[in-house]
Structure formats: C-alpha cells, structure tokens
Image (tube, rainbow, N blue to C red):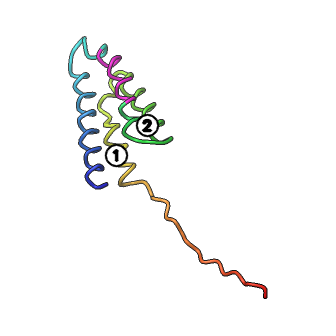
Amino acid sequence: MEKEKYNLLRKGIFYDIVGMVTMAIPVVGPFLDILWAPFAAKQMSEMYDGNEGKIASVIVFVEEILPMSDVIPTFTLMWLYTFVWKKEKRETRRTIKVKADN
C-alpha cells in the first residue's frame, strides 16, 4: 500500500508538470490543452476511485481547459487530500450483550 501511495504521487507530479509545460509553449499551448484536458481527466478517474475520483476528474478537466489555470497542481492536491488531509472513517466496534432466556 505504501509503495502504491508514492507511485500515485510520482505519477501525479509528472501529470502536473506536463500540464504546466503546455502553458509555456506560445501559440500552440492552448491548443495542446484541448487535447490534454480529457486525457488528464481520464487519468485522474483511473488513479482515484469512487465519487472523489469522479469529482477530481471534472476539476482537472476544467482546470486544464481554462487558460492560465495550468499552474494549479491538481493531481498533487488530490494526492494530498487523499493521503494527508482526509480524515479516515474509523470503524468503531461495539460489543452487544444478549441475554438468553431459559
């Protein structure tokens, strides 16, 4: 689990860098974002399961498609949310005593 967690971080940082590089290319960069945005959204939904992954994929799509918002490291922020900031639901176990009628 620990190794997989950091593989997701490395992959996310790579995707964030690629998304930022398109902004640095004059004239062609915005057109590359049109191609990059759906790919980034698909990758986000594959990296993170459930509703959180779906919401993050929509956010990364919008972030990549909008001009000048490529500086937001969406993949890294999602990793931080998932593994650092999010409070895990702790399972509480209770013992229930049952009286037997004889």
In magenta, the rendered stretch is: 32-42
Residue located at (66% from left, 81% from top)? 97
Q: Does 102 sit above or below residue 72? A: below
Does the residue at mark 1 contact the one at mark 2 (Cβ under 8 Å)?
Answer: no
Q: Circle 1 — which element?
A: helix
Q: Is residue 87 magenta?
A: no
Query: Residue 6 location in percent, x, y?
Result: 26, 49
Q: Which residue is mark 2?
A: 56
Q: Which residue is mark 1?
A: 79
- Which of the 4 quarters of the picture holds residue 57? top left
The residues bearing labels 1 and 2 have C-alpha atoms spaced at a distance of 10 Å
Q: Nearer the viewer, residue 74 or 83?
A: 83
Query: Residue 85 location in percent, x, y?
Result: 39, 54
- Which of the 4 quarters of the picture holds residue 21? top left
Dot 2: within a 10 Å radius of its alpha carbon, few (fewer than 14), some, or many (20 or more) residues? some
Q: Please indicate whether residue 86 sits to the left or right of residue 80 in the image.
A: right
Q: Does 96 sit above or below residue 79? A: below
Residue located at (35% from left, 32% from top)? 43
Which amino acid type corresponds to the residue marked 2 in the rendered image?
Ala
Q: Which mark is residue 20?
A: none
Q: Please indicate whether residue 50 sits to the left or right of residue 73 in the image.
A: right
Q: Does 26 sit above or below residue 100? A: above
